[in-house]
Amino acid sequence: MTLRFNRLCYCAALSLFAAPYTAVADVAIQHEQNLRDSEREINRQIEQNRYQQLVESAADRTSEQQKHEQEHSETLSSACLPVNGLQLSGVHLLDQTALADLTPIPQDCISDENVNRLIRELTQRYLDRGYITARIVFAPLDENRTLRLHAVEGVVENIEIDENTSVGTVRNIFPALSGKPLNIRDLDQGLDQLNRLQSNRIAVDILPGTQYGGSIIRLKNRATALSPYRFYTSVDNYGRKNSGRIIGRIGLSVDNLSGYNDFLSLHHSQNLDNRSQGYSRSYSGLYFIPYGYWTFSAFAARSDTAVSLPVSNAKYYGSSRQLGVRADRVLSRDQVKINTLSVGFSHKQSSNHLLGYRNPDQNLRLSVFDLSFDQLRILQNGTFSFNIGMQRGVGLFGASHANAQMITEPHFHKFSLSANRQYTVLENTLQIRHHFTAQLSKDRLPSMETFDLTDKSAVRGFDRLNLSSDSGWYLHNTVSYPTSYKAVNITPFIGLDAGRIFNRNAPNAWQSAVGTSFGISLAYKQLSGSLSFDRGWFLSSPERQNESQLLGKFVITF
């Protein structure tokens, strides 16, 4: 009886006043949107710069390969050498498959050309597998006048840190590397882990060791003037009307907190206007630590929103919380691509109430298991990456279970796909970025897990209209022109977006929206900002509902 009475009061409040309903919708959307924004920012920080060594090295390796080809393009003698055969020894890192397609050596006449071709082919096979210090040397002829070639595959003697460089310990960056063959992929992976920190610009020198075939790796930080502490504050108008349009944000990040090249970041945001009517606050934190090809992360986020309803002055409250852990493992990498597997687990809680009534579908505890695969590939004029993932709601740690009072399914299944293509045209003057995101689920998802079509990170241009569903997709397209005037970096840009969601409750299940954006970004030393005019059209409404926004952001970084 009490539940039915509270539900009737709740429905009556929403049906009597249109304005209160809009305010309630804003609160319900805002705090969960804040949580999703925090989740996206956490993922961005985990993934940022982890591939930069691959990107930066691609051009250098291309030029080195061309130089290597030029060095060996000279004509060699085809005259027979005074030898009776050829013997190869010391090859342990190449398998039979790698050796099977070597150019055969003639038995009756071995020439300089034959020998040098064999050395080039062997060296290239070592390089293709990442063993950059391996080399082929000549051994003295034996009593049978056999020409002997010996592979010196090389090992890492030691890893040294330049005396003017402070990067903490590197034992977790290059675990058990000493005494093993030097592979450029292990080295690049370690540099990626080190250079993810904003205060690091680590370069490496490979020096001759004290032993024959040995190498010493010396690390040096070129960014000696950068502080491990970074603080920022910003103001923007990305909020919603009823819960606060103007948002202030602050953040602090610390590099190498424990001396193991770990990272900690803390963020907080709050509305700066309409504080007498309500509030919108969010908090988030991230910590990660690397270990070789692994990165382990822990994160937390919270969002609280409240608004006073017009006429009744009743308050509607909304709150969302999240705790999670994640492990990323680089499965493989070479000169043009990196494959990464990620496994995560998070616990989420959502709470909303009005007039003493709590909607069961908006007051949930979720435990979510996440598995995803990511690949980054270097192309001729840019990069391409994609991520495919599966998320599953499970019944751990007090997670909610479906019941007769609920519409949504806490133990859901959903699949996600995203792809990014970045490249330049017109002699690198224009930068073009395409971003595609899709989600598919047969379950009725809790609102914390739905796909947002009209969010600012999806189809741009919408302010009041909120379109979300269990399944959908959108395509983000942005063209920018980076330039500079004196010390100011200027980047004008235009954007065109399109997307659809599947609304199982609508007569026309698929609903479509498009959006445009015209803006400019500016940066000068520690100051940066952006201004854009966005417009969106909901194509599936009879009158083709459209909205527009003028968005601005100002950031100071210390």
Image (tube, rainbow, N blue to C red):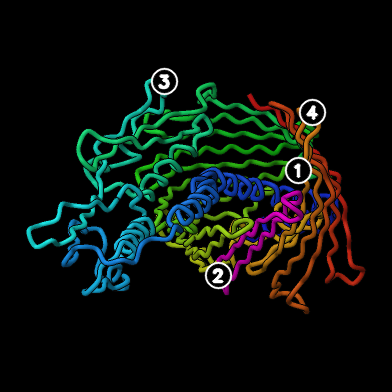
Image quarter in which the C terminus is found = top right
Magenta highlight range = 416-442
| Residue sitting nearer the eye, 430 or 294 | 430
Per the image, label 4 sits on a secondary structure element best described as: loop
Q: Position of residue 454 (x, y in %)?
A: 75, 58
| Amino acid type, mark 2 | Ala
Q: Along the horizontal axis of the image, is 83 left or right of 479?
A: left
Query: What is the three-letter code of the residue carrying label 4?
Result: Lys
Res 482 label: 1
> Residue beneath label 4, please?
486
Name the amino acid type tagged 1.
Pro
Asked whether 550 falls inside the magenta stretch, the response is no
Residue 164 image label: 3
- Residue displayed at 43% across by 58% down: 341
Please report the residue visible at 43 percent of the width from the left and 50 percent of the height from the top.
326
Q: Secondary structure at mark 2?
A: loop
Callout 3: helix, strand or loop?
A: loop
Can residue 322 be seen from the camera position used here? no
Q: Nearer the viewer, mark 2 or mark 4?
A: 4
Which tag, 3 or 1, sits closer to the chain's start?
3
Residue at numbered disc 2: 404
- Between 296 and 362, which is closer to the camera in this rendering? 296
Q: Amino acid at mark 3?
A: Asn
Looking at the image, residue 348 sits to the left or right of residue 427; the answer is: left
Q: Which residue is found at the position 86% from the left and 70% from the top?
A: 541
Q: Quadrant of residue 360?
A: bottom right
